[in-house]
Image (tube, rainbow, N blue to C red):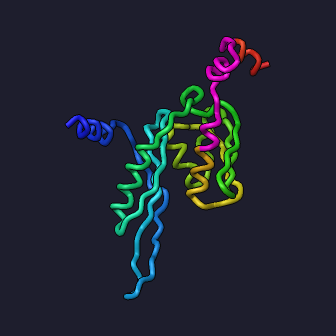
Amino acid sequence: MAREDKKRTREDAPDINERLVAVNRVSKTVKGGKRFGFAALVVVGDQNGRVGYGKGKAKEVPEAIRKATENAKRHMIRIQLKHGRTIHHDMEGSHGAGKVVLRTAPQGTGIIAGGPMRAVFEMLGVQDVVAKSIGSQNPYNMIRATVDALTKISSPRQVARRRNRKISEIIRHVES
């Protein structure tokens, strides 16, 4: 019984938005012809610093999307945002042949990023960022590279804790 309650609370988590990024039709050749299936790529987030991505495969599109959404909700990560609107510093991320460059942006810039990266930033709650994809245009690799870059970003609080310093010392050195 307790297990059902945990599942229900995870499924009914408030303010989790989802964005369908890509749907692929895949086929398998068998003796009688071809069997078609679908693969979906979904990004979910609470637009307040949490984001996740997942993929799902099924014989029909809605089922593939449902599986991808569940997978994404299970693998959500938290990212610290600067003033709740942008990233703390510039960063590069990569996965396979895909490479992305993320740059902070002043207020009012908006999200300047291509397809799959834009979905990640919108679900994360980033309002101002400039991003460039270099190399692979495969949406799976672009999303993985973006998440890789986001996980490498560290806030002044994390840097101060790592160096055993006060946050004011870290911020003072950054501005100089």
What x and y, as percent, mark residue 23? 46, 64
What's the residue at 56%, 57% (across, down)? 140
What's the residue at 62%, 33% (across, down)? 87
Q: Is residue 105 above or below residue 144?
A: above
Is 75 or 126 nearer to us in this picture?
75
- Where does the C terminus fall, quadrant-wise? top right
What x and y, as percent, mark residue 158? 62, 23
Question: Number of marks in the image?
Answer: 0
Q: Is residue 42 above or below residue 6?
A: below
Q: Give left or right: position of 52 versus 159.
A: left
Is 110 or 120 nearer to us in this picture?
120
**Residue lying furthest right in this view?**
176
What's the residue at 75%, 21% (across, down)? 174
What x and y, as percent, mark residue 83? 57, 26
Q: Give left or right: position of 12 versus 40.
A: left
Magenta highlight on residue 149: yes
**Residue lying furthest bottom in this view?**
32
Dominant secondary structure of the residues highlighted in magenta in the image: helix
Magenta highlight on residue 135: no
- Where does the N terminus fall, quadrant-wise? top left
Q: Is residue 5 above or below residue 100?
A: above
What x and y, as percent, mark residue 27? 45, 76
Is 5 or 118 nearer to us in this picture?
5
Occupied quadrant, residue 106: top right
Occupied quadrant, residue 6: top left
Q: Is residue 58 above or below residue 159?
A: below
Q: Which residues are magenta?
A: 148-168
What's the residue at 71%, 55% (across, down)? 134
